[in-house]
């Protein structure tokens, strides 16, 4: 197919069907960058409220750069993939300190920013600066694989290179930003992963997958991710209006977020408080224990499957000194409920506190 013809079909479809989204009505690279980071691995319906919260709180990149880390993480809370939030904050600081508050205007320079990969750099370069660089995300993989009948594994290095070259071959040189928006929107609304509307598709006539009955088989993605199962036994320890928390460190999930004292076990959850070694030092000062082993929480991440129980311990305020000594010894923190509300927390902790399953 002629490159311009393929692009023109997508562009014509886009002008008729595109959603009115705030980041599409601007060439401000800050707004475009913010939306792209938030929407990575996130549906538009889920990401839009977060985008609005961030842009209202931090209307300029300088505002985001100056914000406290905990505040940024708290605003991101519930969106998942928290390394994106940390990188977002670091990138804002870098744009301000190194680039004087102005995003670089070239694809190669954008790639050097913290947390900006080839997809995000291409999006900013084309949307904000009209550079002819193709974006390649899951939607683009799907449209190209189906239309051209490409069965190369999109998760492989060779596959990514092949699709990147193909995407750049077909991009509109006159309207690169609009073309990139069009092919992604087409994959999101028309050429969907399941049950695409092939009968009313403007690309149907030339689509290899439609002709050969391979729509459900393409694109090919061989899953090589090993999923690890983990067992978290949380101690929800309360004393008066205060609760014990800890900030998660580097080298594991949810870095920088706050959860509760945790005892992780190897093969299953603990079903008896006598098995909680972490209690050593405060086991005799607990007035009340609520332990419901049948109330298991399941939390699925990309590489991990987590099963968790929460055991609530209520400690009389007369034992406050013993508890505080234990907290200091263990490297935990004591906070009141208002502070707990404002701390950034994993979705798993939020579900427990909100009484969700």
Image (spheres, helix red, strand yellow):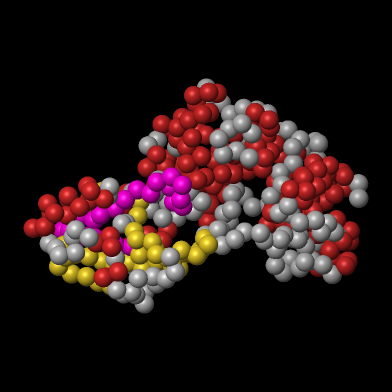
Asked which quadrant contains residue 22, the reply is: top right
Q: Where is residue 115 in the image (x, y as percent from the top left)?
A: 56, 39
Residue 288 in the image: x percent, y percent? 18, 69
Q: Nearer the viewer, residue 53 or 22?
A: 53
**Total numbered badges shown on the rendered structure:** 0
- Snapshot quadrant of residue 149: bottom right
Residue at image point 20% right, 52% down: 326
Relative to 290, is 284 on the left or the right? Answer: left
252 drawn magenta: yes
Q: Relative to 290, is 77 above or below?
A: above
Q: Is residue 113 above or below residue 294?
A: above
Confirm whether residue 28 shows in the render.
no
Magenta stretch encompasses residue 35: no
Query: Considering the image in quadrants, where does the C terminus appear?
Result: bottom left
The residue most toward the bottom is 294
Residue 219's quadrant in the figure?
Answer: bottom right
Residue at point 42%, 42% (across, down): 72
Image coords of residue 206 (percent x, y):
89, 58
x, y percentage for residue 172?
Answer: 80, 40
The residue at the far left in this view is 318
* Magenta stretch in the rendered image: 234-255
Instruction: For residue 57, say whether it is visible.
Output: yes
Give the left or right position of residue 285, taking residue 79 as reference: left
Residue at x-position 71% and y-position 47%:
136
Compared with 283, 76 (above or below) is above
């Amino acid at each position: 197919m002629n490159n311009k013809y393929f692009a023109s079909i997508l562009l014509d479809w886009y002008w008729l069907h595109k959603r009115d989204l705030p980041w599409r009505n601007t060439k401000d690279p800050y707004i475009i960058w913010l939306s792209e980071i938030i929407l990575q691995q996130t549906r538009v319906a889920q990401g839009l409220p977060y985008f609005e919260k961030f842009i209202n709180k931090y209307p300029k990149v300088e505002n985001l750069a100056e914000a406290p880390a905990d505040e940024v993480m708290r605003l991101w809370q519930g969106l998942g993939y928290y390394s994106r939030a940390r990188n977002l904050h670091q990138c804002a600081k870098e744009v301000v300190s190194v680039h004087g508050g102005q995003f670089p205007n070239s694809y190669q320079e954008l790639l050097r920013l913290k947390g900006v990969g080839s997809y995000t750099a291409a999006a900013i370069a084309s949307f904000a600066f009209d550079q002819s660089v193709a974006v390649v995300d899951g939607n683009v993989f799907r449209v190209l694989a189906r239309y051209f009948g490409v069965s190369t594994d999109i998760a492989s290095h060779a596959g990514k290179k092949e699709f990147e070259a193909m995407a750049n071959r077909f991009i509109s040189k006159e309207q690169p930003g609009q073309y990139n928006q069009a092919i992604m929107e087409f994959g999101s609304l028309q050429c969907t992963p399941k049950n695409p509307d092939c009968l009313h598709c403007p690309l149907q006539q030339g689509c290899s997958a439609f002709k050969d009955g391979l729509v459900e088989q393409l694109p090919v993605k061989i899953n090589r991710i090993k999923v690890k199962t983990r067992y978290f036994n949380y101690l929800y320890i309360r004393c008066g209006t205060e609760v014990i928390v800890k900030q998660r460190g580097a080298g594991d999930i949810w870095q920088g977020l706050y959860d509760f004292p945790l005892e992780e076990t190897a093969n299953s959850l603990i079903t008896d408080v006598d098995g909680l070694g972490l209690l050593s030092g405060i086991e005799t000062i607990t007035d009340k224990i609520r332990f419901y082993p049948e109330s298991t929480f399941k939390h699925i991440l990309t590489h991990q499957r987590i099963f968790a129980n929460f055991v609530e311990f209520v400690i009389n305020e007369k034992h406050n000194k013993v508890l505080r000594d234990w907290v200091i010894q263990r490297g935990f923190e004591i906070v009141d409920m208002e502070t707990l509300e404002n701390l950034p927390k994993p979705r798993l902790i939020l579900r427990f506190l909100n009484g969700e399953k």
